Amino acid sequence: MASPLRFRRSTERWTDEKVERDLYDPLDEKFGAQLSTPHYVEPSGFEARRIEMGNGDLALFLWKSDDGDAYWLGNTETPSALWRTEKYTFEEVPYSVARWAQRELLADLRTEAPWLADYDHLAWFFLPVLFSKDGRHSSRTFFREHAAGFPDASRDEALTFYDEFLRSGALDDHRYEMASKLGTSPQVDPVRMASAMSEFTAAKILTDAGYDVTPEIEVTTGHSLDFRADSSGTDSPLVEVTRPRPPTRRHADTPVAAVRETAETKTSGQLQKHGGGAVLFVDCSGFRDDEWAAVRGEQPAVRHRPAVVFRARPSGQVEAYRKGSLPLEFDGTVEWV
């Protein structure tokens, strides 16, 4: 399984002839390819080409003709001439290079999946996955057919929810790390992918409550917890997120049992080894109205304190109940039930 899309940087000198011989020709021989100019003007000082494969793969290449500085970005087989080059994220290459490449990809997305490109912040944020070699079809299918994990919402409602959150820029500094959580498997796995989106939902709740979130916090046990929630003048609690599968999709007979079983798995593993102190977020956003009503009515314990059991809707409404004394404040952002 290939990783999310990243640049390769070459320090060799490149010419039109070398690009055609070492990059285009091997791809054309294997896939059938077309060498063309890009949609947008390349960054100052660079020359650029697009290589479009017959199987739908794409590669972008730009180079400075006066020195050895070149960048490859592709979701196809990497030509042997670039095998020993280092990989870089969008944030690790020069801004002008990243901006140009992203404009190229977003233009392609508008042609291939205009319904997704309309959500420009979400599309930009998830570009490394939406154009990855193995995950580009599965990630788009998940957003198109599974409403990003909301069981009773339209695709547009769900995408608007996440687009508006990502517009805040709260996760921009952690874009590659967070976008990669959606995965690059060629198979659509709605359960796993919805669980990844739960972390975005939790981050939105924390951000709306006034916290700055930092993902993937390493703790002394060698594990990582999902977030640290920072706010001036307070301690910075750690947050771990879990998402119960609805009873219709698991062996648990009832919604309450689904919540208990999922929370028990988390608390008997990662949180137990951590030794306490973290807040457990149990995201029931995948539950239908009747399933959440059962959980809301009984408010089962989850074998960990402090904990927040919640259900978010694309409208922005968040209903929740809590267990234990929370080191976090959610005034006006969560409706306690």
Image (cartoon, rainbow, N blue to C red):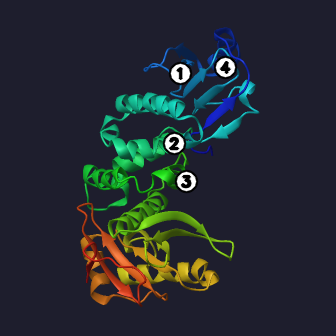
Q: Quadrant of the C terminus?
A: bottom left
Query: Residue 12 shows which numbered tag?
Result: none
- The Cα atoms of the two marked residues, 3 and 4, are separated by 29 Å
Q: Residue shown at 47%/88% (left/top)? A: 305
* Disc 4 residue type (three-letter): Leu
Query: Residue 23 shows which numbered tag?
Result: 4
Query: Residue 54 shows which numbered tag?
Result: 1
- The Cα atoms of the two marked residues, 4 and 1, are separated by 15 Å
Image coords of residue 278 (percent x, y) = 52, 80
* Disc 1 residue type (three-letter): Gly
- The Cα atoms of the two marked residues, 1 and 2, are separated by 21 Å
Query: Residue 128 shows which numbered tag?
Result: 2
Residue 142 visible in the snapshot:
yes
Query: Which residue matches tag 3?
Result: 177
* Disc 3 residue type (three-letter): Glu
Residue furthest right in the image: 84
**Element carrying mark 4:** helix
**Element carrying mark 2:** helix
**Element carrying mark 3:** helix
* Disc 2 residue type (three-letter): Pro
Quick check: 258 left or right of 214? left
Residue 286 visible in the snapshot:
no
Badge 3, how many Cα within 10 Å: few under 14, some, many 20+?
some
If you read the primary sequence from the N terminus, does the residue marked by circle 1 or circle 3 appear first? Answer: 1
- The Cα atoms of the two marked residues, 4 and 2, are separated by 22 Å
Using the rendered view, name the quadrant where residue 153 is placed: bottom left
Quick check: 251 left or right of 12? left
Image coords of residue 157 (percent x, y) = 25, 54
